[in-house]
């Protein structure tokens, strides 16, 4: 029974924790303009009038719901943040293309695929798996470093879609993946909310609160590291043939069968 409740609790804790932090930050920003119960006029007077009838527990429940609502709206998926982060880094390091060089258009280079969302061992395993599959299914005349890069690109881009198939193939491995992704989302969102709170505290209280940036930024980076560990489970499922990437399989099929060119003299692909 507890195991069945855990996935729901994981989905609840992230918006609640981040919602409380953002609510605290907004309170510190707007506390001077928030009317008190001593005022007899204003749009919030009916709300203050009904508060004594609700009681402290009901008021706490309402506050928790509002915090959850705020956290749900402001929540950012760790995978989304990681993708944005990797895009910014890639664009900052990529040289500008030569507008007069037609060969630059759509060019793929061996090793140019961004595997920043994977650990290095997992990226090596996925690269080896991709090349082995190409070697078995595609004729040598149709293989090239550019083709290998494109195949690897299909695998990396299809990783987020494989979690649903993993649930059907192996529920235990999917449970570990879901736990790690939920933990990554929690760390990333608490880190972002903590950085926002640090900015508010620096402006409202004391400049030394800027030091809160350090642990909050480290927490966010730990969340991205946890996300890479979760993606490693998807890679493990791929290389052990628990799940298959449809985009990768379609790409290989489009290259043609292993028989290659009908005029080929290579007996290994006939």
Image: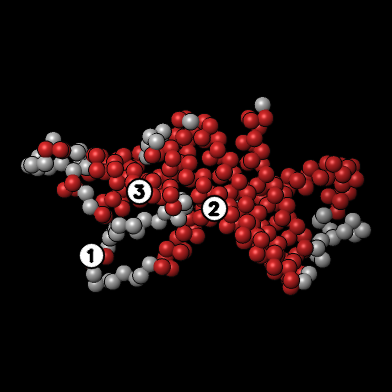
Q: Earlier in the sequence, mark 3 or mark 2?
A: 3
Looking at the image, residue 69 lies above or below residue 33: above
Residue under the point 38% across and 46% down: 126
Residue 225 is marked as 2
The reply to whether discs 1 and 2 touch (Cβ–Cβ < 8 Å) is no
Helix, strand or loop for disc 1: helix
How far across and how far down the image is residue 171, in percent? 52, 31
The image quarter containing residue 169 is: top left
Q: Which residue is mark 1?
A: 103
Helix, strand or loop for disc 3: helix
Taking the image as shown, residue 12 lies to the left or right of residue 138, namely right
Give the alpha-carbon distance from disc 1 to disc 2, as whole Å: 36 Å
Residue under the point 70% across and 64% down: 212
Q: Give whichever of 105, 133 is nearer the camera.
A: 133
Looking at the image, residue 56 lies above or below residue 217: above
Q: Which residue is mark 3?
A: 127
Q: Earlier in the sequence, mark 1 or mark 3?
A: 1
The reply to whether discs 3 and 2 touch (Cβ–Cβ < 8 Å) is no
Snapshot colouring: secondary structure
Is residue 154 visible from the viewing direction of this image? no
Of all residues shown, which one is farthest toward the front? Answer: 121
How far across and how far down the image is residue 186, in percent? 63, 49
Looking at the image, residue 265 lies above or below residue 194: above
Near mark 3 (Cα within 10 A), the count class, few <14, some 14-19 or many ≥20, is many
Give the alpha-carbon distance from disc 1 to disc 3, as whole Å: 25 Å
Residue 74 is marked as none
Give the alpha-carbon distance from disc 3 to disc 2, as whole Å: 20 Å
Near mark 1 (Cα within 10 A), the count class, few <14, some 14-19 or many ≥20, is few
Q: What number of labels is visible? A: 3
Q: Earlier in the sequence, mark 1 or mark 2?
A: 1
Taking the image as shown, residue 121 lies to the left or right of residue 136, namely right
How far across and how far down the image is residue 211, in percent? 69, 68
């Amino acid at each position: 029974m507890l195991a069945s409740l855990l996935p729901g609790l994981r989905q609840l804790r992230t918006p609640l924790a981040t919602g409380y932090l953002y609510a605290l930050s907004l309170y510190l920003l707007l506390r001077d303009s928030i009317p008190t119960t001593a005022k007899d006029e204003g749009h919030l007077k009916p709300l203050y009038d009904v508060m004594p009838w609700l009681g402290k527990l009901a008021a706490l429940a309402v506050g928790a719901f509002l915090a959850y609502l705020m956290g749900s709206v402001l929540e950012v998926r760790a995978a989304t943040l990681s993708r944005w982060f990797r895009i910014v880094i890639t664009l900052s390091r990529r040289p500008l293309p030569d507008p007069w060089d037609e060969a630059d258009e759509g060019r793929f280079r061996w090793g140019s695929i961004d595997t920043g969302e994977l650990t290095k061992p997992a990226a090596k395993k996925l690269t080896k798996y991709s090349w082995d599959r190409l070697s078995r299914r595609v004729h040598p005349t149709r293989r090239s470093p550019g083709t290998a890069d494109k195949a690897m690109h299909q695998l990396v881009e299809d990783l987020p879609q494989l979690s649903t198939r993993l649930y059907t193939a192996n529920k235990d491995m999917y449970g570990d993946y879901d736990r790690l992704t939920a933990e990554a989302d929690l760390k990333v969102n608490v880190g972002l909310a903590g950085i926002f709170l640090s900015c508010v505290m620096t402006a409202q209280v004391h400049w030394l609160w800027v030091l809160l940036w350090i642990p909050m930024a480290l927490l966010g980076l730990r969340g991205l590291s946890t996300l890479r560990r979760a993606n490693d489970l998807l890679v493990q499922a791929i290389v052990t043939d628990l799940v298959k990437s449809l985009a990768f399989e379609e790409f290989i099929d489009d290259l043609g069968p292993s028989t290659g060119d009908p005029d080929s003299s290579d007996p290994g692909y006939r």
